[in-house]
């Protein structure tokens, strides 16, 4: 299965949640690979990506998730929580986690993160940091209109008109 995980809310209503249990995004720098990096088969782009400060969860290899943030403040007001919350790494709902597990059981890693709507309140949901534990080169550079940067982010040669994208919902 090929994943490009995103949702409409990321583009229409950008919300950058705050971590409640760590001071900043450096927590991701403390999440290590399960194996020593020198024992992994990293290609040149991945090695460059690590040299530029990429975290272990951005490579398709298993990690030790003990240092991952566990509390996140949703600052989207009264809006419902989307299926996907993006904050450096991707946090997904239980429904999406179960759907991924249905098709690829035991392949990927999920680390729980409690979602709060108020700093002093109770958690309103449990989401899961998603570590996709396999990476497939799924772009045909000769037939696509994207170019690649060393940080894996595909940049379109033209802008995307999201109005042309069919409305789809998660039906788990």
Image: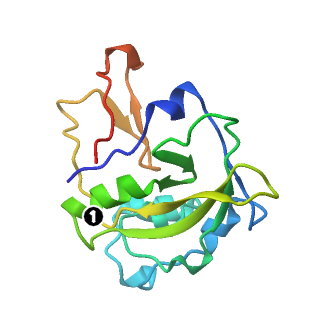
Residue at 70% over, 36% down? 77
x then y, percent, for residue 129: 49, 62
x then y, percent, for residue 30: 62, 75
Mark 1, other Cα within 10 Å: few <14 / some 14–19 / many ≥20: some
**Is 5 on the left-hand or right-hand side of 32?**
left
Tally of numbered discs: 1
**Is 48 on the left-hand or right-hand side of 66?**
left
Quarter of the figure with residue 148: top left
Say if 67 sits above or below 17 in the image.
below
For this rendering, which residue is in front, 162 or 134? 162
For this rendering, which residue is in front, 96 or 155? 96
Residue at 42% over, 58% down? 94
Say if 17 sits above or below 120 in the image.
above
Which residue corresponds to mark 1?
A: 101
**Would residue 76 be visible to someone looking at this image?**
yes
Colour convention: rainbow
x then y, percent, for residue 171: 28, 42
x then y, percent, for residue 43: 33, 64
For this rendering, which residue is in front, 155 or 99? 99
Q: Which residue is outermost to the right? A: 120
Quarter of the figure with residue 149: top left
The N terminus: image quadrant: bottom left
Say if 148 sits above or below 156 in the image.
below
Residue at 21% over, 47% down? 138
**Would residue 161 be visible to someone looking at this image?**
no
Residue at 37% over, 54% down? 95
Q: Secondary structure at mark 1?
A: helix
């Amino acid at each position: 299965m090929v994943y490009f995980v995103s949702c409409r809310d990321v583009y229409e209503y950008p919300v950058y949640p705050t971590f409640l249990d760590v001071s900043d995004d450096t927590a991701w720098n403390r999440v290590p690979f399960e194996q020593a990096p020198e024992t992994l088969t990293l290609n040149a782009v991945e090695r460059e990506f690590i040299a530029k400060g990429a975290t272990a969860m951005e490579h398709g290899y298993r990690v030790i998730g003990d240092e991952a943030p566990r509390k996140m403040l949703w600052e989207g007001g009264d809006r419902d929580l989307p299926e996907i919350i993006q904050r450096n790494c991707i946090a997904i709902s239980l429904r999406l986690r179960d759907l991924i597990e249905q098709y690829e059981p035991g392949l990927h890693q999920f680390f729980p993160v409690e979602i709060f709507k108020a700093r002093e309140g109770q958690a309103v949901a449990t989401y899961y940091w998603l570590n996709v534990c396999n990476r497939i080169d799924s772009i045909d550079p000769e037939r696509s209109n994207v170019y690649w940067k060393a940080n894996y982010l595909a940049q379109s040669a033209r802008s995307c008109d999201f109005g042309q994208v069919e409305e789809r919902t998660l039906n788990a």
